[in-house]
Image (cartoon, rainbow, N blue to C red):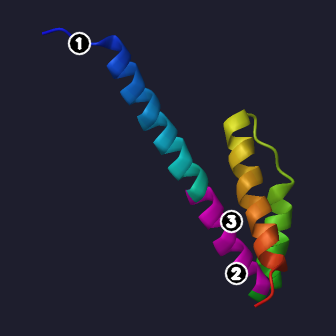
C-alpha cells in the first residue's frame, strides 16, 4: 500500500485549519454571552474588566483572552 504523503499533509492542514477556526468562533460566542450578561449586571462587568487585566504566559492563551474580552466589551456597548 502506497500512501501519498502530500495527501496526508493536506488532510492534516485542512483539519487543523477547521479546528482553529471553530475554536476562534467558539471564543467569540463566549465573549458575546459574557457581554450580554454584563449589560444586566454591573458585578459581571467589573469581573470582566478585572480579568482582562491579567496576562497569561502563553501567546495562544493571551490571544484567546483578548478575543473573548474584546467581544464582551463590544457586546456590552450594543443597544438592547
SS at mark 2 in the image = helix
Per the image, the residue denoted by label 3 is: 31
Q: Main secondary structure of the magenta part?
A: helix
Q: Disc 3 to disc 2, how far (Cα)?
A: 10 Å
State which tag comes first along the sequence, 3 or 1: 1
SS at mark 1 in the image = loop
Residue that lies at the very extreme toward the top in this rendered image: 2
Q: Give the answer, above or below, for where 12 lies relative to 62.
A: above
Magenta span includes 33: yes
Q: Disc 1 to disc 2, how far (Cα)?
A: 51 Å
Per the image, the residue denoted by label 1 is: 3
Image position, residue 46 (x, y; %): 85, 73
Left or right: 51 in relation to 64: right
Per the image, the residue denoted by label 2 is: 37
**Residue in view at x 74 percent, y 64 percent:** 71
Q: Give the answer, above or below, for where 6 lies relative to 33.
A: above
**Residue in view at x 23 percent, y 12 percent:** 3
Quadrant location, the N terminus: top left
- Magenta range is 26-39
Quadrant location, the C terminus: bottom right
Magenta span includes 78: no
Could you classify mark 2 by the number of other residues whose Cα lies within 10 Å: few (under 14), some (14-19), or many (20 or more)?
some
Amino acid at each position: 500500500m502506497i500512501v501519498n504523503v502530500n495527501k496526508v499533509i493536506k488532510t492534516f492542514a485542512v483539519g487543523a485549519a477547521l479546528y482553529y477556526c471553530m475554536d476562534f468562533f467558539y471564543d467569540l460566542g463566549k465573549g458575546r454571552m459574557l457581554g450580554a450578561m454584563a449589560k444586566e449586571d454591573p458585578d459581571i462587568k467589573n469581573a470582566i474588566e478585572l480579568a482582562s487585566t491579567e496576562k497569561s504566559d502563553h501567546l495562544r492563551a493571551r490571544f484567546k483572552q483578548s478575543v473573548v474580552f474584546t467581544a464582551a466589551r463590544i457586546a456590552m456597548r450594543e443597544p438592547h
